[in-house]
Image (cartoon, rainbow, N blue to C red):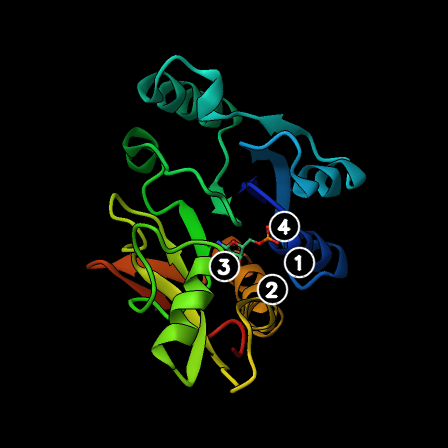
Amino acid sequence: MLKIVVCVSGGGTNLQAILDAIDSGSITKTEVLAVISNNAGARALERAKAHGIPGIVMSPRDYPDRAAFDRAFTEEMCRLAPGLVVLAGFLVKIPEEMVREFSNRIINIHPSLIPSFCGVGYYGLTVHERALERGVKVTGATVHFVNEGMDQGPIIAQKAVEVTEDDTPEILQRRVMEQAEWILLPQAIDDIANGRISVENGKVKHKRQDKAR
Ligand code: GRF
């Protein structure tokens, strides 16, 4: 059984997609131990509660400095000891000590086709605003392992989504969620839970024999 902790900051629609996929059986061998949010008002925490999953609030604002938060956050994660940490719209940078402790055991969903529109400052609606400003015709989402760099870890899966001429950032964000994020993230968790993913020389390899993708 893969035990996961999901980290969230906001709406939690990706968390919901994970919970729904566990309920429907499209994610197997997986249990959500806890949901951690830096934002006590996150709707994601209500979604966790509705599922009987413990919610934990940990914000850098509640600590004297960033190093104290990083230490407490890493300690809490070590206490929970998940097999996988899932960042599902989590707006806090993961401490380096946690990246080291959970090497190739932290994944993130990013709402663009990395390496486009990613890195420092590219989060939330901004990603879609920049994509529209640039006039790209295709965008999408990426699930990747988290390393020390921002959005630079090994890519697990990507899915393209069409951009249309009338798109606003909000409309595009919703389409990327519906057509890519809510599909990719649960699929990646199921792949990891079922041992279908490995990292070799900084790149993800999919073992395709057990399940057609
Ligand atoms: C998603 O677009 C995710 O890719 C990004 O933040 C958003 C979170 O949405 N990093 P939600 O909280 O899962 O609804």
Alpha-carbon span between mark 3 and mark 4: 18 Å
- Towards the viewer: 70 or 199: 70
Look at the numbered discs 1 and 4 and tell me whether their residues touch, using CB distance below 8 Å.
yes
Disc 4 beta carbon < 8 A from ligand 1? Answer: yes
Q: Which residue is mark 3?
A: 125
Which comes before the other along the chain, label 1 or label 3? 1
Q: Is residue 49 visible?
A: yes
Residue positioned most to the right: 50
Identity of the amino acid at label 4? Answer: Leu
Given the image, on which type of amino acid does mark 1 rest? Ala
The percent position of residue 206, horizontal first and vertical second, equals 39, 69
Say which of marks 3 and 4 sits in front: 3
Q: Residues within 10 Å of mark 3 (few under 14, many from 20)?
A: few
User: Helix, strand, or loop for circle 4?
Assistant: helix
Q: Is residue 86 above or below residue 102?
A: below
Query: Measured from the top left, where is residue 77 in percent x and y?
Result: 47, 28
Left or right: 143 in relation to 43? left
Mark 3 or 4, nearer chain start: 4
Question: Is mark 2 in CB contact (under 8 Å) with mark 1?
Answer: yes
Q: Cα distance, mark 4 to mark 2?
A: 9 Å
Q: Secondary structure at mark 1?
A: helix
User: Foreground residue, 162 or 23?
Assistant: 162
